[in-house]
Amino acid sequence: MNRVLVIGDVIDDIIVVPEGAIRTNTDTNARITQTLGGSAGNIASWAAHAGADVTFVGCVSSSDEQRVAKEFEAFGVHPQLQTSNSKSTGSLVVLVEGDSRSMLTDRGANKELSLESLTIDYLSDFSYVFLSGYTLFGRSEAEIKNFIFRVQDAGALLAVDPGSTGYIKDLGVEEFKRAVNGVDIIVPNDEEFELLTTETSHLTIVTKGSEGVDLYIKGIKTNTFDAPVVHAIDPTGAGDAFAGSLIAYLANGEELNQAIANAARTAASAVTTIGARPQP
């Protein structure tokens, strides 16, 4: 069974790449692209792109349900969207400056995503469940622990992307570590890893951009994987490309080290294009 469930945020991304240094109080020419993003949505799209049978659960404005569903279907993802009548679909402005990004976020309807509706019977249809870390913020530790129990009791492996150092600090580092303790796989970037270390999961897979990927098993570093050298145009979504393809390769039966190496190649390819999702 290679079915993967991805749960989390849906965001309308507005990606801004200035042609030069930003000038205050006047105009700066820039390339501006609008795409459907959100870490979990991106991960689902990359997982489907890598060959998994992917279902996505997220929450959007009721007025956007059909638009967003069609976007997911175009990437081969089966959307099961919850809707909000009071909040707009989440949105994000990404300002790209070389290898760095600044992000301004309005989570909108993502705040109303319900985990309680995902029962053990429902979860048992999937071999892997991937939960975006953004989904954890604003929830109690008990609610998160209960969800982890349901996933694992259903027989699925649970992977978590921590999401954001800023949000982790807002929640509290120790609180976040307690909440996700016991998940099967955690996929932080190097900055998130500095906050969380290896205490929370069986497998910790650390993405380090152009410096590659580190694998920790039960807290012990066992391997490092090089990142292919590419000409990066837009780093937005590289971590999502890695995470989504990694879960797909694992769900399809690839050995762990091979899955990580292949996912690193996918992530390298992703930064050579604009946007956070696979190109047609």
Image (cartoon, rainbow, N blue to C red):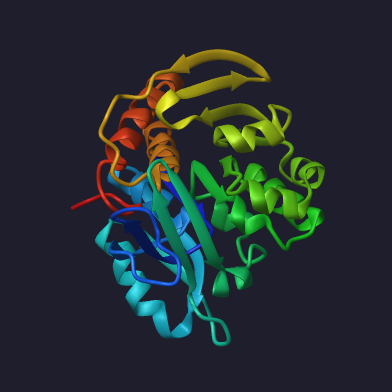
Q: Is residue 275 at all visible to an observer of this figure? A: yes
Q: Residue furthest top?
A: 222
Tell me which corner region of the image, top left, top right, bottom left or bottom right, holds residue 244: top left
Give the residue at x 34% y 43%. 52
Q: Position of residue 94 (x, y in %)?
A: 43, 59
Q: Nearer the viewer, residue 142 or 100?
A: 100
Q: Nearer the viewer, residue 240 or 13?
A: 13
55 left or right of 132?
A: left
Q: Nearer the viewer, residue 110 or 33?
A: 33
Quadrant occupied by the N terminus: top left
Tell me which corner region of the image, top left, top right, bottom left or bottom right, holds residue 87: bottom right
230 left or right of 167?
A: left
Q: Nearer the viewer, residue 119 or 11?
A: 11
Q: Position of residue 142 (x, y in %)?
A: 81, 55
Q: Is residue 50 at all visible to an observer of this figure? A: no
Q: Residue furthest left?
A: 280
Q: Position of residue 183 (x, y in %)?
A: 66, 38
Give the residue at x 67% y 20%. 218
Give the residue at x 51% y 80%. 88
66 left or right of 88?
A: left
